[in-house]
Amino acid sequence: MNSEKTLNYLQLLPSVDEILQQKELINIITPNNRKTIVSIIRNTIQDYRQDILGEASKPSSMDKVIKVIIDNVIKKVNKQFSPGLRRVINASGVIIHTNLGRSLLSESALQAVNMAASNYSNLELNLDSGKRGSRYTPLEKIITEVTGAEAALVVNNNASAVLLALGTIANNKEVIVSRGQLIEIGGSFRIPDVMVQSGAELVEVGTTNKTYPNDYKNAITENTGLLLNVHTSNYRIVGFTRETTVSELVKLGKKEGVPVMSDLGSGSFVDLSQFGLPYEPTVAEIVKAGADLITFSGDKLLGGPQAGVIVGKKDIIEKMKKNPLNRAIRIDKFTVAALEATLNEYRDINSAVNKIPTLKMISNSPEELYTKAVDMLEKFNQENLTAAKFQLVKTVSKVGGGAMPTAELPSWGVEIIPQNSNPNEITSYLREEEPAVIARINDNSIILDMRTVKEDQTGDLFDVIRKSLS
């Protein structure tokens, strides 16, 4: 670009004062934010100047330059003053998306949290006696009812549940676990590391792909405190394999006088094989098998808030309640409210499947999703957007959240095929919008999987896609 043209383009750049006088900005400037907005305007104009000098921009008029600068300033101002935690539309097809907050709460759970947040409550008050009560009482009652366990305790997440259990039962004792179950999950949470932190001594038995009951039996000593079964919820070993079941461990534990613990990870109250997923034992089934202690998450397949749920024999649970660590990892009133409401839904399994968003998304049929995708496609086609082509696409959804790693659910979506841009550029725009949209890139196209798009989000999804492609 010659210097004369560059100078002409640079002369189209407005001053900071000119931008400040634009009506779109006047409405958002206050005495408290004026200094910040002025700084954003100055930086935005400077960025535009660098684009011109680098030949990345060739503006045709000052009006167009002003519009671009104002749009960018407003976007930056919104980002600067908006909460860090933002609303996101999940079009990725991953139902329990760890990066997006995992499970969505049911309407009853949302109402319960709102009640607890906006009112005083009897969190630790027995209204009958007028004396101090326990925050765990309402939860323990309903958990034992729906699982069949003797007792229950809830802490802030499943990692804490495992740590508390090991520290209570097996401190300074040996814990026997299969080599094939020495898992690591998100955030570098490793079973061997948790053992060290709890004061327990890890004893590995068997091989990566095969572990038999006799492997556990031969490792039992006078100092054995626990037989541990860890559900491999975030990976699968396939082929020439053999797992020792919880029932087999319970039989051995009773004979040798050693308690048995099962860490289910993503514990479910519903047999999900009816929806085409692999069979996974439910919490009630593991309780029935006789495990002394079972731990699982509240915010994965259960579909509630983040929590670590512990069920099992009453004498062990009572010891855990008295462990000083329990105070440090206890749940707050919002978790109590949300989890109680979620658990209440499970008194009627059919109702739970329809009312708990995680279960509803899992159970949605391909036919329902096809209709949803067709409706979205028709909206796009009516807009005649030339920046991309749109078409129906068969796709697959994932459960996510460390649950059922090899399982796929047949789904339908809308495929966006950009005509003059890169899919990565478009998905970058989508993440910056309000609400943000998280989609899936497939080669040179973008997939909107309709399984994880809520019914009341389809309008917002359409608006964000249209704006980004414009």
Image (cartoon, rainbow, N blue to C red):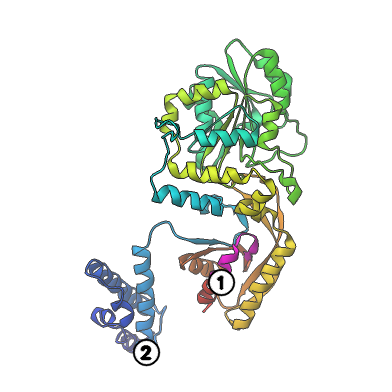
Q: Main secondary structure of the magenta part?
A: helix
Residue drawn at x 26%, y 79% is: 20
Picture disc at residue 459: 1
Name the residue type under label 1: Gly
Determine the image quadrant of residue 413. Answer: bottom right
* Residue farthest to the right, as pictured: 240
Q: In screen coordinates, is 51 left or right of 94?
A: left
Q: Nearer the viewer, mark 1 or mark 2?
A: 1
- Residue numbers of the magenta segment: 448-460
Name the foreground residue: 61 vs 261. Answer: 261
Q: Is residue 351 above or below residue 128?
A: below
Q: Quadrant of the N terminus?
A: bottom left
Q: In screen coordinates, is 278 left or right of 296?
A: right
Name the foreground residue: 445 vs 54. Answer: 445
Picture disc at residue 61: 2
Q: Is residue 67 above or below residue 357?
A: below
Name the residue type under label 2: Ser
Residue drawn at x 74%, y 51% is: 275
> Residue 154 in the image: x percent, y percent?
51, 34
Picture disc at residue 381: none
Name the foreground residue: 437 vs 419. Answer: 437
Q: CA distance from mark 1 to mark 2?
A: 34 Å
